[in-house]
Image (cartoon, helix red, strand yellow):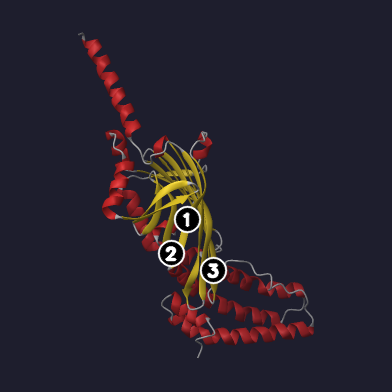
Amino acid sequence: MCARQIRSILLVLSLLSSAEAYTTFKVFDVKRAIINYKIKGKGKIAQDNYLSIDGNSSLVFDDWGMRKLYKEKYVETTKGSVANSRTIFTLYLDDRGDISKVDFKNKKINKREDLIVKAAIKNGENLYQKQIEDMKAKGTNIDTSVVLGYPCAVWLYKSKKRCIYKGISLREESMVSGIKVVKEAISIDFDSNFSRDAFVLPNFKEDKQNGFLMKEKRDTHSRNIKKIKEIVKDEISTTVEVDAEDVELDSGTEITEEVFHDQKSLLPKLFNEMKEARVCLEYAESRVSANTCMEKLVDIEEKISGKKSRDRDIVIWTDIAKEDKLDEFEFAIMDMKRRMPCIRRSQNFVDLSRCMSDLDEE
């Protein structure tokens, strides 16, 4: 056998080995799918405060999960003595171990490599089978169920109750800030062929980092996140979309901790703006100038509550209306002044909730 024939055989064997690796490698035991989920949760998180989480997510994948795109958007709303609302948006693409996560706040795409997945593809390992083995070793199979006609095994695994069908979670239950949040499939399509458009990301600049560099960046970002918020909170509303690098539903981050720090820093500013508005209103000669006095106060209230109040619009500015408005502000300023020492001493969400509640006032 000549050298050329030997080289040809070796090339064919190499190609076959590579093809077998790509065929053997699996994340899911389904070739392709589009799954849409509904996310819901609601419950009491403090004495008279309630948290609701409402949103949607979707998972699109092909080639047995070798390429998958996950998108999630949900709204966290806190009601009661402490009110707040914000929207969290997550979007990432995992293409054979090349991961692209969208940072909407900075309008860029963070890129990194998953070396474990890269090695699994190269070695032809079956990650789907490994996941099943890991669940058996570290989780507990507690039940069986059915979601949209698909039978699934219910596992307690990694602090969540998951209903797994061929490696795909069709229903998840997790605890977020002490309340149960359920993410459940509302539509499943295992047969559709989809175009490349299904995996398109926003046209943002790319920031490529590998291995531990990405982890180091996240850790540094996490340590400095409170300082960053102190700088930017005066510039943005709490209702803008927040990149899930900071807050992510699956991360188990305590929402109440985030709300507490935001509210505690904004409430003293609210108190100051109330006093400024009161002085300004006393000298306002028209409805237009009176509404101008209210602008900064309305902005702070929007950041605190997460929504713009229409109740602050002044439509009539007569002598009687002016006196009524000044009396209203006098009462509100005295009430807030009484609460301020408690707000400054507060150490957590429960403390702050008590400060803002009428139930525990001295």
Q: Nearer the viewer, mark 2 or mark 1?
A: 1
Mark 2 crowd level (few <14, some 14–19, many ≥20, 10 Å Cα): many
- Residue at horizontal 51 percent and vertical 71 percent from the top: 50
Measured as percent of width and height from the top left, residue 361 is found at: 51, 88
Disc 2 secondary structure class: strand
The kind of residue tagged 3 is Asn
Name the quarter where the N terminus is drawn.
top left
Q: 50 or 98, which lies in front?
A: 50
Q: Could you tell whether 7 is left or right of 69 in the image?
A: left
Mark 3 crowd level (few <14, some 14–19, many ≥20, 10 Å Cα): many
Residue receiving disc 1: 183
Q: How many marks?
A: 3
Measured as percent of width and height from the top left, residue 229 is found at: 46, 64
Q: How far apart are the two marked residues, 2 and 1, measured between alpha carbons?
A: 12 Å
Q: How far apart are the two marked residues, 2 and 3, measured between alpha carbons?
A: 16 Å
Numbered badge on residue 176: 2
Residue receiving disc 3: 84
Measured as percent of width and height from the top left, residue 262 is found at: 48, 70
The kind of residue tagged 2 is Val
Q: Could you tell whether 297 is left or right of 45 in the image?
A: right
Between discs 2 and 1, the one toward the N terminus: 2
Q: Is residue 104 visible?
A: no
Between discs 2 and 3, the one toward the N terminus: 3
Q: Residue furthest right?
A: 318
Between discs 1 and 3, the one toward the N terminus: 3
Q: Nearer the viewer, mark 1 or mark 3?
A: 1
- Residue at horizontal 27 percent and vertical 34 percent from the top: 123
Numbered badge on residue 25: none
Position above or below: 140 against 180: above
